[in-house]
Amino acid sequence: MAVAFTGTPEQEKQLLAVIGEMKETKGALMPILQKAQEIYGYLPIEVQKLIADKTDTPIEKIYGVVTFYSQFSLYPKGKFQVSICLGTACYVKGAGDIYDELKKQLKIDGGGCTEDGKYSLDACRCIGACGLAPVMMVNDDVYGRLTTKEIKGILDKYS
Ligand code: FES
């Protein structure tokens, strides 16, 4: 479920100032998007539209860039950022099932955030703890040798 966009006039002012400064610079789209993400924490469609409008760039192009680069997020991050490793070692040990269980428990898709802003869910690449596969992180806490049965208990710790 998407979280309602709650940008403030102050954030918009900051973004417009950034665009005003960089607009005429060639190749400014990436730095503008990076700044926008810093200001808002993510790049919802409302922010993309504003950038498209103010830089005379087609929204399709902006959306294409935002969805292509993993540094950009279309969704806000939750207070607890859940990240499941889908690297090879974790994958062969069943990380796909853990990922499905997380989606089921949190009722969101990968890249999404729960409506209350508490949890966001992402898949990541190898975090260098392959010996503990399958591995997931909740903020800085690492959980290894996971089974689907453990997921609810782990999430409950953060509720
Ligand atoms: S593949 Fe998951 S920690 Fe290395």
Image (cartoon, grey):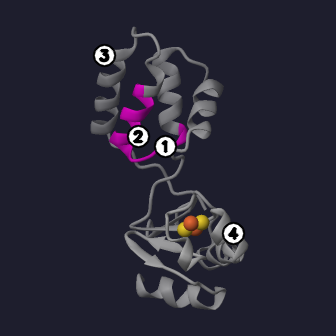
**Mark 2 or 1, nearer chain start:** 2
Q: Quadrant of the C terminus?
A: bottom left
Apparent side of residue 102 relative to residue 3 in the rendered image (left or right)? right
Gap in angstroms between the C-alphas marked 4 and 2: 30 Å
Gap in angstroms between the C-alphas marked 1 and 4: 22 Å
Gap in angstroms between the C-alphas marked 1 and 3: 22 Å
Span shown in magenta:
31-45
Query: Residue 110's image quarter?
Result: bottom right
In the picture of the structure, the residue carrying the numbered disc 3 is 21
**Mark 1 or 3, nearer chain start:** 3
Query: Residue 18's image quarter?
Result: top left
Indicate yes or no: mark 1 CB to ligand 1 under 8 Å: no
Say few, some or many: other residues with alpha carbon within 10 Å of mark 2 (under 14 / 14 to 19 / 20 or more). many
Residue 159 versus residue 124 in the image, above or below: below
Circle 2 — which element? helix
Q: Looking at the image, can residue 143 be seen? A: yes
Q: Are discs 4 and 3 less than 8 Å apart at CB?
A: no
In the picture of the structure, the residue carrying the numbered disc 1 is 71
**Mark 1 or 4, nearer chain start:** 1
Q: Along the line of sight, which residue is nearer the eye, 98 or 55?
A: 98
- What amino acid type should be assigned to the residue bearing mark 1? Gln
Q: Which of marks 4 and 3 is in front?
A: 4
In the picture of the structure, the residue carrying the numbered disc 2 is 37
The image quadrant in which ligand 1 is located: bottom right
Residue 46 versus residue 59 in the image, above or below: below
Number of numbered discs visible in the structure rendering: 4
Gap in angstroms between the C-alphas marked 2 and 3: 17 Å
